[in-house]
Amino acid sequence: MSFTLATWNINSVRLRAGLVERLMTEEAPDILCLQECKSPVDKMPLAQFAELGYTHCVARGQKGYNGVAILSKLPLEDLGEMDFAGLGHARHVAARLENGTVIHNFYVPAGGDKPDRTVNDKFGQKLDYLTEMRDWFRESRPENAILVGDLNIAPREDDVWNHKQLLKIVSHTPIEVDHLGAAQEAGGWIDVTRQDIPEGNLYSWWSYRSPDWDAADKGRRLDHIWATPDISSAASGSRILRAVRGWEQPSDHAPVFATFDL
């Protein structure tokens, strides 16, 4: 089985349903994982996506916040969700393809503005979430699995526009990078994007606050595709569709792609 998979923080699937349909039409990934859907599942425009061939869906949602969905042309089995850190948020869902490959779709908490849990509860929640991810992977080490999503951390120096300036900025602080690295190591996950594109600056998010995001190019790579070692060598063709960030009324994230030949 060969399939192309994409992950995209859509920042409201109802508001940007047209952009999702455009991506489905122009790029036609076999599987599209969305985060920050900001909608209950019964309010997501799933019928519109089904008309374009995405007749299978596993999703978790809530009104106005969070929300994750796996939209697929291929049959899916719902494997449930995990509520790390007990937040009660729709931040994870898992599904299994017919060939046995498991897909995890994550939306890790952003963590607020101040990288100090003593004054910012959201930062503490982010660290706790990552710690429980680590523990889960350690206890039930994944196999034949792909993990995608907005992990809200840019781990490498070349995953941000300026490493030194962002060391004290949430998403690139050393403690966040360490926590993400511990979760990745616990599951044995391979960063597929960097496996395919090992060198050079690479971003998937540009702030709305920048009036000319493209020219300023102050980006961060917050969106990731990982795979377990037993299937990571089957991945190829990784890319980030930067141009999507320039579509009308866009998400501040661009979709990330990879192809798997399993």
Image (cartoon, helix red, strand yellow):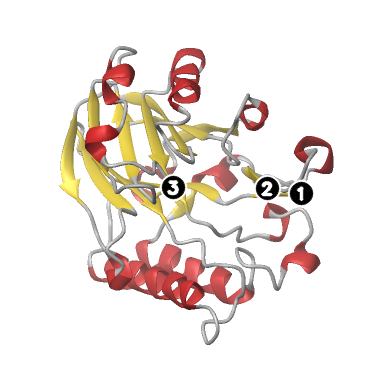
Viewer-proximal residue among 110 and 45? 45
Residue placed furthest toward the right: 215
In the image, 23 versus 122, the foreground residue is: 122
Q: Quadrant of the N terminus?
A: top left
Residue underneath mark 2:
207
Label 2 and label 1: CA atoms lie apart by 8 Å
Tell me residue 90's x, y (percent).
30, 53
Residue bearing mark 3: 149
Point 41% across, 44% down: residue: 35
Which residue has dot 1 on it?
A: 218
Q: Are marks 2 and 1 in contact (CB under 8 Å)?
A: yes
Question: Compared to 173, does 13 lie above or below?
Answer: above
| SS at circle 3 | strand
Q: Are marks 1 and 3 in contact (CB under 8 Å)?
A: no
Specify which label sits upstream in the sequence, 2 or 1.
Answer: 2
- Name the spot of residue 5 as percent of width and height, x first: 41, 31
What is the x, y in percent for residue 69?
A: 32, 39
Q: Quadrant of residue 203?
A: top right
Query: What is the secondary structure assignment of the residue under circle 1?
Result: loop
In three-dimensional space, the C-alpha distance between marks 1 and 3, rounded to whole angstroms, equals: 21 Å
Residue visible at 38% across and 69% down in the picture: 129
For the image, the number of numbered tags is 3
